[in-house]
Image: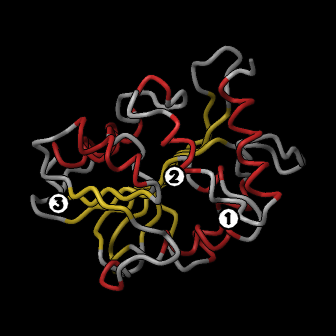
Amino acid sequence: MSDPKTATILLAKAYADKGDPDGWFEEFYARAGGEIEKIYWADLEPNPLLLDWLDAHPAPAGRRAVVVGCGLGDDAEALRERGYDVVGFDISPSAVEMCRRRYPDSSVEYVVADLFDHPTPWRRGFDLVYECNTIQILTGDNRRRALNAIAELAVPGGEVVVSCRSRESYDNSQTFPIALDRREIDGFVRAGLTEVHFLAYDDHQNPPVPHFFAVYRRPA
């Protein structure tokens, strides 16, 4: 039996082969049958760099935040705890249902939505947009489309916080997930945002995996 990552790669390839390269997300979460431990990539805790950023930059209560591809909800709940009115969305109904079951009393609005076809009021509708590891599991032109769509969620003066795996510009590996290089993540600047914070670091896995953590702001 293949390991979970290999099984995911095969699942993604099967969907790509039938012309739906990003359609495997719902099947992946549905296969888990509501069992959180089967979502092998989930840390089941908020991103510590996100927590550090939020604690260093407290916002007035009631500001709006959105979590792109909210997964199992840990980061959305961290934003809620820090006073944001939060929307967490995912294209997978099974993922959203797992969030609702994990946090039945939460004020976070967990919704099923498509980044490329979200409610019109979301455009430039959030003070903070959090993107973690969504772009890297997309393929082809959807990576650029996703980056631009994420940028468009931020209000004037709002911030887009991005966490992702990284690679060197000369690394042409297409191994899943496909990490972002500096030119690709700089697409947020090309989309009209201003870079206000950028960190390249290695995580604590063995062997370490390189990452980017960056913050961009839409000019007011």
* Residue 217 horizontal/vertical position (percent): 42, 69
User: What's the CA distance linking mark 1 and mark 2?
Assistant: 17 Å
Residue lying at 38% horizontally and 81% vertically, measured from the top left: 123
Looking at the image, tell me whether mark 1 or mark 2 is earlier in sequence order: 1
Q: Mark 2 points at which residue?
A: 214
| Other-residue count near label 1 (Cα within 10 Å), few / some / many at <14 / 14–19 / ≥20 | some
Quadrant including the N terminus:
top right
Residue lying at 28% horizontally and 68% vertically, measured from the top left: 127
Looking at the image, tell me whether mark 3 or mark 2 is earlier in sequence order: 3
* Residue 93 horizontal/vertical position (percent): 40, 54
Q: Name the residue under label 1.
A: 143
Kind of residue sitting beneath label 3: Asp
Asked whether the residues under the numbered discs 3 and 2 touch, taking CB atoms below 8 Å apart as contact, a structural biologist would say: no
Kind of residue sitting beneath label 2: Ala
Kind of residue sitting beneath label 1: Arg
Q: Name the residue under label 3.
A: 85
